[in-house]
Amino acid sequence: MKPEAIQLLSNAGLFGPVILVPVILQEDFGATKDVIGLIAGAFAAFGFISSYIFGRASDMHGRRNVLLLGLLLSASLTIIQAASLAWGGFAFFAGVRVLLGFCGGIFPAALLAYAYESKSKMGKFSAWGAAGWGVGNLTVGLFGTFYEAAYLYCAAILFVSFAVALRLPITQEARMDIPLFPTALIKSNAPVYSAMLIRHTGANMIWVTYPLFLASIGADARWIGIIYAVNAFGQFFVMNLLDSFDPALLVVVGLGSSAATFFAFTLVGSYWQIIPAQVLLATAWGCLYVGSLRYVMDRNKEKATVTGLLSSTMSLSGILGPVFGGIAATAVGFKGTIGVATVMALVALVIFVYDLMRSGELYRIRVLSRGLA
């Protein structure tokens, strides 16, 4: 259970503050929505870089040291983030937030590869990450406006995850020689990378100002934390059920239900009405993430590299989405932005299904689906 405990704790500590950042930037520093988007994009840009660099390093030099480095740096930067609220200004806070993006991208691929090679089921293992995210959002929301204390709480959780990682056994790992730019790996996994990039760019257009959208329909800080937690704990439940399903089928379901979820967001008029859509969102992301993760890990021996590339794809969408989302929220409002994200999820679905048709894999999925029915 040690990898699962690290997954739970690291996600709670790293993603708990997500619900605070847009509010802090707007209320404490007077940042506009497009500036909030730029900072979120910079955070993701640094994660994009580190996810690839250290995913590859994990395949070449071993998992454990990369994991320990990432957890220790993330915990340390989270403490500095608390200090930036107490003694710094806008530039200090934003700069630390961006560096935290780099540190947070160091360890996930190494942890996933370690868990996979330890015979963990990827659906169940991913579920612990969703649970950690839910615990982080829910408990951070309870701090209300005590932002410094919330960050110190998250740093403590990350230090505990580092302590657990110190007790991981050192395993015998096959060290691989990975090209600096693994063109063959990117090409062979392009269908899932491209689908994830398009869908998740649209999603991040929503998430960059999502707490502000929830506040605009009546949610206070505690309800924002609860709404985020519904999604996260829903993912925990759904992901535990997905290991027996075909990865490509999960990706198709995840993309289609993402479009349905985003469309549902446009229909809500009050914060309590969005809770059913959060449950649908949990199903959509659970299917898409677990399906994508298994799609690349089952097909490649370079587990950390292909996982790091998937994380980098998600981070790239986290660069593009917040920038476009901040601009779109200013130009067409929250619901206009959500409408654009709905179309992008549909485009991603069409691209992925077309590739399945071209490769002949769609026929296998149809036969499999009839067998499941």
Image (cartoon, rainbow, N blue to C red):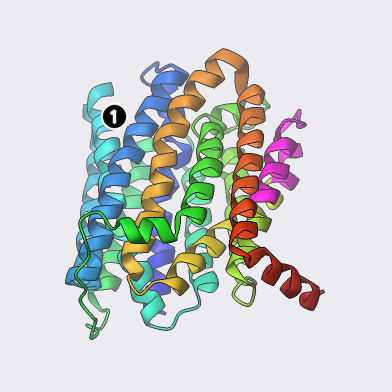
Q: Is residue 154 above or below residue 8?
A: above
Residue 265 painted magenta: yes
Q: Nearer the viewer, residue 198 or 226?
A: 198
Percent position of residue 228, x then y: 58, 46
Q: Nearer the viewer, residue 190 or 131?
A: 190
Near-viewer residue (301 or 207): 301
Instruction: In the rendered view, tell whether residue 101 sits above or below residue 116.
Output: above
Label 1 crowd (10 A; few <14 / some 14-19 / many >=20): many
Q: Residue sitting at 43 percent across and 56 percent down?
A: 12
For the question of whether residue 195 can be seen, the reply is yes
Q: Quadrant of the N terminus?
A: bottom left
Mark 1: secondary structure:
helix
Residue shown at the point (25%, 54%) measured from the top left: 181
Q: Which residues are magenta?
A: 255-277
In the rendering, at what x and y percent does residue 299 appear? 45, 72
Task: Tell me the quarter of the picture where residue 115 sits.
Answer: bottom left
Q: Is residue 229 magenta?
A: no
Where residue 196 appears, as percent x and y from the top left, is: 51, 49
Place of residue 325 in the rendered image (x, y in percent of width and height, measured from the top left): 51, 26
Which residue is disc 1 drawn over? Answer: 94
Q: Main secondary structure of the magenta part?
A: helix
Q: Is residue 304 left or right of residue 255?
A: left
